[in-house]
Image (cartoon, rainbow, N blue to C red):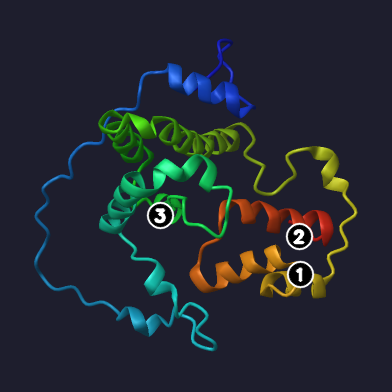
Amino acid sequence: IVSGAGTLFKVFTPFWRACLRATPPAPTRPAPQVTWATPAISSDELDSWQLKPTQPNWAHAWPAQWQPGEASAAATLELFLAERVQHYSLGRDFPAEIHTSRLSPHLRFGEISPRQIWHAAQRQKAQNPSVGEATDKFLSELGWREFCHQLLTLFPEMPERSFKSPFDFFPWQNNPDFLKAWQRGQTGYPIVDAGMRELWHTGFMHNRVRMITASFLTKHLLCHW
């Protein structure tokens, strides 16, 4: 997605307008029919790798929150479009309520694609026009994800350096006690602590609270991101 001058966008709104003017993404193709090899292959038991936390097992509640895989991703999308998307535009601003899609980890690990979400959302809009505006808002947030990928193409140093170079010289304090309190949800600021504890207990943090906790870490505690 490029501007009329053929350059990549640096601002989201004109980027998204160009996306909506462009040819819609092609539908995904059906899963191929694959015949798997049958001979047994020797392998380690997954538990032998000791990947799960034990002392303490801070992820003990995660299985009740998440079911990894393609089928779960599809079911999560279906539930969101059928029951939650109608409240998305306003409801996503209230962290204590469940009005977001919870699709981010499924997208992150390739269990569902942006194209699948796009076309499922378009079908929902056609079947239920009353949720059209809310669905479009949701799709624009998916557009933010695409926009950030494009920014990384334009500015590949972003993961390691500040987007604005003057901040490379910011006088960070990097107090280790402040950082530990933030990580453990013990800062004394209720919404910050609630977000960090939500992350510990569920593996997820509401988007609005993500912005608050990140801002608190850098702008209040002056810890280098």
Helix, strand or loop at disc 2?
helix
User: What amino acid does circle 1 point to?
Assistant: Leu
Residue 184 picture quarter: bottom right
Horizontal placement of 198 versus 47: left or right? Answer: right
Which amino acid lies under the numbered mark 2 shown in the image of this protein? Leu
Q: Which mark is residue 48?
A: none
Are dots 2 and 1 in contact, CB under 8 Å? yes
Quadrant assignment, res 205: bottom right
- Provide the secondary structure element on which disc 3 rests: loop
- Tell me the residue that label 3 is attached to: 109
Residue named by callout 2:
217
Residue linked to disc 1: 179
- Residue 64 at x, y = what percent? 38, 73
Give the residue displayed 44% in from the left and 54% down from the top.
102
Residue sticking out furthest to the front: 130
**First in sequence: mark 2 or mark 1?**
1
| Residue 34 on image: x %, y % | 12, 51
